[in-house]
Image (cartoon, helix red, strand yellow):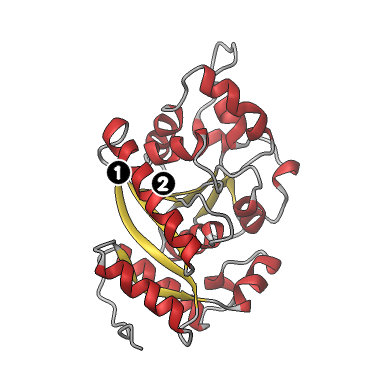
Amino acid sequence: MRRVVFNQKGGVGKSSITCNLAAISAARGKRTLVVDLDPQGNSTHYLLGKPASELKDTVADMLEQTVAFTVFNRRPDEFVHASPFKNLFVMPSSPELDFLERKLEAKHKIYKLREALKKLEETFDAIYIDTAPALNFYSRSALIAAQRCLIPFDCDDFSRQALYNILNEIRDLQEDHNEDLVVEGIIANQFQSRASLPRQLVRELIEEGLPVLPVRLSSSVKMKESHQSRQPLIHMAPKHPLTRQYEDLFRILHGETVELEPLTD
């Protein structure tokens, strides 16, 4: 399964969600790949422990060969790096993505990522794609390449207005480029259960018929500690409540039964 985590708004936890769901997948024995399409390279740094600027054989290098004059293109798996965690691999980001974007757009290479990921599905059981906080060439490529889309939602009114725009953009892209893409769910992230506004916003989204997933990911300093230590929560703090929330989310996405507390006032 190819999943993209996307939101045009920054600071909503795309990289954290991408990496922690992928880490759980890998911990369950699935060969799992994270593709980092954000030039900032947060997922790359989180899982490989090195800034994207220090790495060679990146996703930018893979895409650049589609516009270069080369006789033989390298295989997509040659741009994949093993992480320190069993079964977890990364196709790292690069700052060069910013400079390459115009070339790729001019040459109409919007489907090249999908072609590469379909080949990589022969090797990997699950692929997670992290995106930049923008509807740009790379995020569109990711939405075209993916089968499922997860949308992190930071519980405030600005995020709510942005959410409607995102859903409209995805609907247009489904009609024109990827009819197989399914919005798998909206993830309420950094959720404060004791505050009334987050509960109200989530309830209203559910009443509007939007696909809000039943797991709320709590706001916790443990996530920042996880970033600093370069260890996904399943490895750094397997018994922490936020880790259990991620595990519940993973199980729901894979059709498993999970008992959750109802959203109450």
Above or below — where is 200 with respect to 170? below
Residue highlighted by disc 1: 181
**Residue 22 percent coordinates (x, y):** 47, 58
**Residue 96 percent coordinates (x, y):** 68, 33
**The one of 203 and 245 positioned closer to us in this rendering:** 203
**The one of 18 and 219 positioned closer to us in this rendering:** 219
Q: Which mark is residue 6?
A: none
Q: Quadrant of the C terminus?
A: bottom left
Disc 2 marks a residue whose amino acid type is: Phe
The image quadrant of residue 45 is: bottom right
The image quadrant of residue 260 is: bottom left
Look at discs 2 and 1 and give the one toward the viewer.
1
**The one of 191 and 62 positioned closer to us in this rendering:** 191
**Residue 114 percent coordinates (x, y):** 40, 33
**Residue 118 percent coordinates (x, y):** 37, 35
Which of the two labelled residues, at mark 2 and mark 1, occupies the earlier sequence position? Answer: 2
Disc 1 marks a residue whose amino acid type is: Leu
Residue 16 seen by the camera:
yes
Residue highlighted by disc 2: 124
**SS for callout 2:** loop
**SS for callout 1:** loop
Image position of 95 (left or right of 141): right
Mark 1: few/some/many CA within 10 Å (<14, 14-19, 20+)? many
Residue at image coords 45%, 35%: 141
Image position of 120 (left or right of 85): left
Above or below — where is 224 with respect to 183? below
Image position of 102 (left or right of 54): left
Mark 2: few/some/many CA within 10 Å (<14, 14-19, 20+)? many
